[in-house]
Image (cartoon, grey):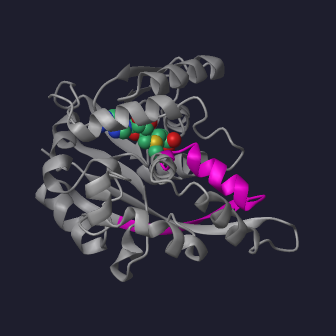
Amino acid sequence: MEKTETSEEMHRLFNRTAGVYDQTGVEFFVPIGGRLVEFAGLGAGDSVLDVGCGRGAALYPAAVAVGAGGEAVGIDISEEMVRYAAEGAAGYGLSQVSTTVMNGQAPEFPAGRFDAVIASLSLFIWTRGAAELKPYLPLLRPGGRFAISTPSFLPTADGRWGLMPESVHDLLMPYMQPARAAEERTFPFANVADNWLVSAESIERELTEAGFVEVEVREEPLQLVVESGAQWVLWTRSTGMRRLWEKIEQLGDGALAEKVAARLDALKDDRGVITVPVPVTYIRARAPQA
Ligand SMILES: C[S@@+](CC[C@H](N)C(=O)[O-])C[C@H]1O[C@@H](n2cnc3c(N)ncnc32)[C@H](O)[C@@H]1O
């Protein structure tokens, strides 16, 4: 499959972010990747595919869960991410890890190749519903597991998006409104208005339509801790939200970062840190038994 415009954009975005991705001392991707692996219920000897593996936040714990007798295959559209993921795996001595540059929208593997397919904080970028979920089903053996994590979109029924701290919502969300995002391509992947992840019912419906069974949805808060508002801004810049800041700067609104940081600084507790509860949605399902 040819890369779509969005995947080209993501390819560029994550290639230029990879060097700093998740390297700002804020714990987010690693605990979520670990929790996803737990939730996926991987077993020793399993063969698991991690779609959009980034720098390995879920890939490495998956490799540990399947053990030396299993295999953990990471794919990512960004060559840079794949390079870091492979380097890390070698550094940890995880010889059961292999990594490949591949567009996760059109995974190219033989049918029934994996016991499990996982994707941590990646699939929400390009999936809009059953049609984009279908490609993962044939990769699984009968009864195989499919498990993903996503920043929660569940609260968006009342206009909120979980990843954004409530106190800066009014400052940043205008740059993410669907009309503006579509027009200016501010943040193409946070399709907050029209998204299969907005309710447990639509998650179950779309996965069922894609052919999966035993769908389970769980929302769990992650307590994101930062030392300052500036660190939160820096952290977001080290993630896919970099795209949002770049667009804000292009629009000449660069001073907004300081305003956001100041709002967050007002939330410092007695220990001098800011805790932002981020709801994360974990979803699991299975391929039907043959
Ligand atoms: C927010 S990061 C999550 C990475 C990793 N799973 C983690 O939890 O740290 C999203 C990842 O998806 C990758 N990605 C985006 N679009 C993709 C696509 N179409 N195919 C494969 N990977 C993609 C990005 O390059 C990036 O590494």
Where's ligand 1: which quadrant? top left
Q: Residue furthest front?
A: 252
Which residue is found at the position 53% from the left and 45% from the top?
Answer: 239
Q: Choose between 224 and 60: the one closer to the eye.
A: 224
Give the residues drawn in magenta, as a range: 217-242
From what the image shows, is residue 143 above or below residue 218? Answer: above
**x and y, in percent, of residue 77 in the image:** 35, 29
Which residue is found at the position 52% from the left and 25% from the top?
Answer: 85
Left or right of 139: which side holds 151? right
Can the viewer see residue 255 in this picture? yes
The answer to whether residue 169 is magenta is no
**x and y, in percent, of residue 217 in the image:** 36, 66
Q: Choose between 68 and 94: the one closer to the eye.
A: 94
Q: Quadrant of the C terminus?
A: top left
Q: Quadrant of residue 154?
A: bottom left
Q: Quadrant of the N terminus?
A: top left
Q: How many marks?
A: 0
Q: Residue furthest bottom?
A: 158
From what the image shows, is residue 56 above or below residue 187? Answer: above
Which residue is found at the position 31% from the left and 53% from the top?
Answer: 184
